[in-house]
Image: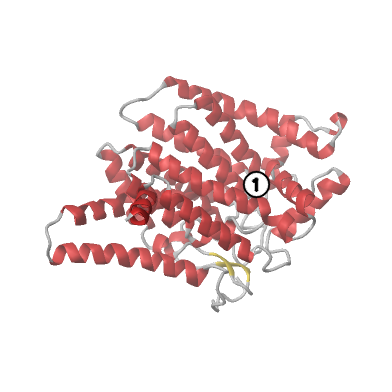
Amino acid sequence: MEIKRNLAQIYRWEYFWLYLLVLVTLILHVVIIGNPSALILDELHYVPDARSIMLNQETMHLEHPPLAKLFIVGGISLFGDNFWGWRFFSVVFGTVTIVLFYFLCRRLTMSRNAASIATFLLALENMTFVQASVAMLDVYCLTFMMASFLLYASRKYASSGVAVALAALAKLNGALVALAMFIHWLFRRQGRSWWFVLTIVLAPVAFVGLMALFDLVIVRDFSALVDPITRIKTMLSLSGSLTFAAADHPAMSRPWEWLIYYKPMAYWHTPHYLSAISPSIWALTIPTFGYMIYRAVKGSSAGLFGAAWFASTYLVWIPVSLITNRVSYIYYFYPTIGAVCLGLGLGLSQLLDFYRERRPGKLKKTVLALFVFYLVFHLACFIILSPLFPIYWPVGAV
């Protein structure tokens, strides 16, 4: 009886499911971290860049800010120029992202069930898992974006502004987090604080100041530093020059195609690292966005936040693509997956509440069956798509 009582207490513990998810995903990452032992996709750019920083005190890819590359440098310095060094901090940051996401959901007044469901969906989502398994810039950007969201929701506006800067210093599109928070702040019905101006003011100030500091870490010489204005112009110019007219890559795609056609992008074939949104998430993305808008109209802060997050990290790419013709790829949707999982967590927890409140009958059984089927289907999608299991996935040369 004592053992049973202790187990029940552990299960009822607020963070039981969070710690279980973190432990499971961390183990899975460690299992595959060295498979393959060769560089994958854009690792072919960023790992050599890290080597250049270590050996020559210069970066070869001026189109990107310095922070994420410095984490790869740090990994190589700690573990050597091998798969542990390349990917260690990606795994760490991907794990931290899951933790921050759960606390964000709770801070947005989502129930424990809703937050746990949303975190389960995010942690075991294929693209989310894959991006945290490779030495690319995106996972660092997303972690700082998530930190900024949480700090904003906690009304720590100055710290949130610094986190926005760190997100953009990992990858420039991290700046979109500021737009998401502004939309939420603008449309929230109560509790709107004008202290939010600290986030908007401190973000660019911290970006410029910290960029100079991180660049100094790379070049190790004050006289070799480029002034911030020139540095920003160079990043924007090089990044903007990669257009559909100038580039030729089989995986490039327009933003609206990501949700219309299901076309995975292969990072590596054996094992199959696929930049593919889990079908369980992809199929419900548009309905979930509509549901979050509905919940926002009904006064849900979480619904409003999720809708603002979705709009600022995904919908914004549609006019950008039309106006600038800039190349984009399916993994640009990676920062938006958390917003979809948040909305699904809200909806599925409401379905669970309906089940619990309903009298016994066929409808109650049907609701439970749908709930369980969806979670099992999501898990099955992860098993099939992720590089953990040797399942052949014919994606051609894409």
Q: Position of residue 193 (x, y in %)?
A: 40, 22
Question: Does residue 4 sit above or below 191 in this rendering?
Answer: below
Q: Quadrant of the image for the N terminus?
A: bottom left
Q: What secondary structure is marked by label 1?
A: helix
State whether residue 319 appears in this view.
Answer: no
| Quadrant position of the C terminus in the picture | bottom right
Q: Is residue 277 above or below residue 288?
A: below
Residue 7 placement (x, y as % from top left): 37, 54
**Circle 1 residue:** 240
Report x, y in % for residue 53: 82, 46
Q: Is residue 245 visible?
A: yes
In this rendering, position of residue 82 left or right of residue 93: right
Q: Is residue 17 left or right of residue 391?
A: left
Give the percent coordinates (x, y) of residue 166.
62, 36
Residue positioned 42% across, 63% down in the render:
260
> 99 and 121: which one is in front?
99
